[in-house]
Image (cartoon, rainbow, N blue to C red):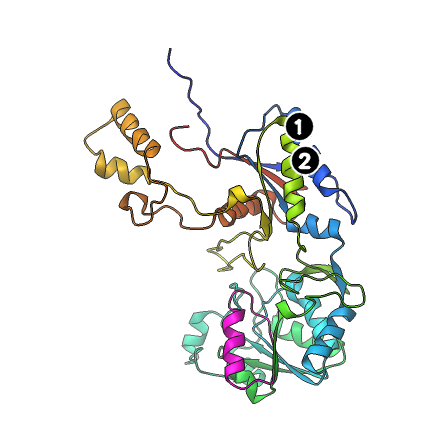
């Protein structure tokens, strides 16, 4: 009798949950929501399914919030409260505006140095065509605000309609600090203005700090050094500080979740107890992918996943089916081709690094790949699905 084959591979489901508040038993809510969805929609759970929850609901359940005043106090204590160089921030009302308000409140003057033509994650001030036409070399040229306006005028963000140069300048002034705007891509430039520097880049922060310290900066902090401990009872993130934070209100931010390994293990155990299935569990934030239209690289969080169960450690170990079909088994077709490819998959090595038959497969961390899938599934608006269930991700052609 012929074995019945599966006709579906990976499935990603957004799971509806209640609105999460501080102090909620998140592990119970997540496990119950997944189990209720399975019962209501008529699907079952399996070993190695992945349950992923957004970092937002984790931080909210933890009550991991901080005020502008807490940011200001930490900035003043760590950077001296006089003239502070604030360099390479991303252009985002959600991600940086409230942080900037706190930074400005903790200083007398802010020298805001913006990278150009875009920020680190691709939000554009200018296009490369504009700077080429102006004869500007972004690797060496330093622009004052006056020169920027003379050459380029007002440039509003394509999607938000915001002129971030004016917007950030006004935010600093509203907090009572003086502001000076500079456009440069060499971090050393800021030392012409001040030797107390807060570098706000995300993924390049370690290099920027190293360069500034070697160039003689008196004080160098990153966003990961601000609110890396509580200030007057505020929330914090011991590892990432302000990185990964989002706007909560006009005067407060929600920080990236604090240590939560116990949470993912708790959800895993609850599902095991209820179903006998060993699932993997992770917390995810931004996905890691680039928008071809806006040129924005989505990942404004320091990592895609801050915590996950051990079964999600590592990278995919996959063979490229079209390579096998076009090369090793190009003379075969039909059932013979199917069986040959299936045999190759069943007998593949545990580590395919360097194997030509794996070229073109995605050499990324499993959590980055699955987290990106989850971010696209849950969206960032009103879908109401802050938990995502991914099934069949670890299946292959032979399953």
The residues colored magenta run 198-218
Which residue: 65% across, 66% down?
Answer: 96
Which image quadrant for residue 316? Answer: top left
Which of 290 and 337 lies nearest the eye of the viewer? Answer: 337
- Look at the numbered disc 2 and give the secondary structure of its residue: helix
Tell me if I can see residue 125 in this picture: no
Q: Residues within 10 Å of mark 1 (few under 14, many from 20)?
A: few
What is the x, y in percent for residue 103?
Answer: 70, 74
Which of 382 and 80 lies nearest the eye of the viewer? Answer: 80
Q: Which residue is mark 1?
A: 274
Position of the C terminus by quadrant: top left
What is the x, y in percent for residue 320?
Answer: 33, 40
Circle on res. 21: none
Which residue: 43% across, 78% down?
Answer: 139
Left or right of residue 184: residue 104? right
As drawn, 129 above or below 347: below
Q: Is residue 368 magenta?
A: no
Q: Residues within 10 Å of mark 2 (few under 14, many from 20)?
A: many
Left or right of residue 65: residue 116? left
- Do labels 1 and 2 touch, CB within 8 Å? yes
Between circles 1 and 2, the one closer to the viewer is 1
Which residue: 66% across, 54% down?
Answer: 259
Q: Which residue is mark 2?
A: 31
- Look at the numbered disc 1 and give the secondary structure of its residue: helix
Q: Residue reaching furthest top?
A: 1
As drawn, 38 above or below 221: above
Which residue: 48% across, 60% down?
Answer: 295
């Amino acid at each position: 009798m012929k074995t019945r084959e599966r006709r579906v591979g990976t499935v990603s489901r957004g799971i509806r949950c209640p609105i999460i508040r501080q102090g909620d038993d998140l592990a119970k809510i997540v496990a119950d929501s997944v189990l209720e969805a399975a019962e209501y929609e008529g699907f079952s759970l399996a070993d190695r399914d992945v349950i992923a929850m957004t970092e937002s609901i984790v931080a909210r359940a933890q009550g991991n919030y901080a005020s502008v005043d807490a940011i200001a106090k930490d900035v003043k204590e760590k950077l001296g409260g006089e003239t502070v160089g604030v360099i390479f921030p991303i252009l985002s009302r959600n991600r940086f505006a409230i942080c900037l308000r706190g930074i400005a409140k903790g200083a007398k003057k802010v020298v805001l140095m913006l990278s150009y033509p875009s920020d680190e994650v691709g939000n554009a001030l200018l296009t490369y065509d504009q700077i080429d036409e102006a004869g500007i070399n972004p690797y060496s040229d330093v622009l004052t605000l006056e020169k920027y306006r003379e050459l380029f005028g007002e440039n509003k963000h394509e999607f938000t309609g915001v002129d971030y140069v004016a917007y950030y300048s006004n935010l600093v002034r509203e907090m009572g600090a003086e502001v000076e705007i500079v456009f440069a891509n060499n971090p050393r430039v800021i030392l012409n203005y001040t030797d107390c520097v807060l570098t706000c880049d995300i993924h390049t922060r370690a290099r920027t700090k190293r360069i500034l310290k070697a160039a003689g900066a008196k004080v160098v902090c990153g966003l990961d050094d601000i609110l890396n401990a509580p200030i007057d009872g505020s929330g914090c993130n011991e590892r990432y500080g302000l990185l990964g934070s989002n706007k909560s209100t006009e005067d407060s931010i929600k920080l990236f979740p604090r240590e939560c390994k116990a949470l993912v293990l708790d959800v895993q155990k609850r599902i095991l107890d209820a179903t006998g299935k060993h699932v993997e569990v992770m917390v995810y934030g931004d996905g890691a992918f680039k928008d071809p239209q806006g040129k924005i690289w989505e990942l404004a969080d320091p990592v895609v996943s801050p915590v996950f169960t051990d079964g999600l450690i590592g990278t995919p170990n996959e063979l490229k089916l079209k390579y096998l079909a076009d090369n090793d088994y190009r003379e075969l077709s039909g059932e013979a081709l199917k069986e040959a490819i299936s045999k190759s998959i069943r007998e593949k090595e545990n580590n395919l690094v360097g194997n030509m038959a794996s070229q073109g497969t995605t050499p990324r961390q499993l959590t980055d790949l699955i987290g990106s899938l989850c971010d696209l599934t849950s969206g960032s608006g009103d879908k109401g699905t802050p938990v995502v269930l991914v099934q069949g991700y670890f299946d292959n052609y032979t399953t």
